[in-house]
Image: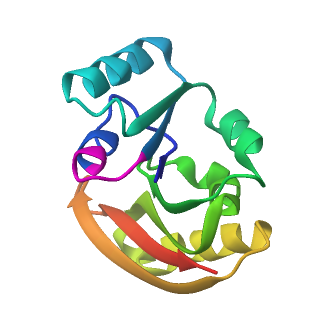
Amino acid sequence: MLDPFAGIGGFTLPIAQAGATVTAVERTPAVFAYLVENVVRNGVTDSVETYRASYPEVVAGFAPEREFDRVVVGRHDAHEHLADTLAVLAPGGTAHVHATVAKELLPERPTRRVRQAAEEAGRTVDSTAVRRVGNNDKRTSRVVVDAVVA
């Protein structure tokens, strides 16, 4: 599993504790230090590989040799890097892409962005589901697009 914008480990830690192997990427030095500390404190050092780097640099180093069966893109403005993310997703893998979207643009805009990114990566999307995970205000929702990518 790849967590390209790991922060302090909000997705990385529970996923590793559930038994998955996680590659966590964080570029901010202070935040990365907390990520590493949290990995140690939670006893998942054998399950988590950490990188302090810019996400696009790390992904460029992975492709095409390394693929992930699942990617959690927990940063709401990460659609600029989505094609790179989908390029390292194994065929049949699932991308969980978070977005902040005006309610009137649901579900079309976040789904369209995932499909466009897949096309840029030379991939296709087999299926998508959009789940609302919160609201920023009366007009804006936080959603996750779950996309299975061929």
Query: Which residue: 70% across, 61% down?
Result: 87
Instruction: State whether residue 50 is above or below residue 150.
Output: above
Question: Is 92 placed left or right of 75 in the picture?
Answer: right
User: Can you give x and y, in whole percent of width and height, for residue 51 in the image?
Assistant: 55, 28
Q: State the count of labels.
A: 0
Residue at (20, 22) in percent of width and height: 41
Residue 48 quadrant: top left
Q: Where in the figure is residue 54, as x and y percent of width and height?
A: 63, 29
Quadrant assignment for the C terminus? bottom right
**Is residue 9 depicted above or below 96 in this figure?**
above
In magenta segment, residue 19: yes
Residue 80 % position (x, y) = 65, 51
Q: Residue furthest front?
A: 46
Along the line of sight, which residue is nearer the eye, 124 or 23? 23
In the image, 147 versus 45, the foreground residue is 45
Tell me if residue 90 is in the magenta stretch.
no
User: Is 36 on the left-hand or right-hand side of 51?
Assistant: left
Q: In the rendered view, how is the structure colored?
A: rainbow
Q: Is residue 54 above or below residue 136?
A: above
Residue at 35% x, 24% y: name it.
35
**Is 71 rendered above or below residue 16?**
below
Q: Is residue 65 left or right of residue 26?
A: right
Find the magenta span and give its range.
15-21
Question: Where does the image place residue 109, in percent across and percent down from the top left?
Answer: 52, 73
Please give the name of the residue rendered at 71% of the width and 45% of the height, measured from the top-left corner. Answer: 62
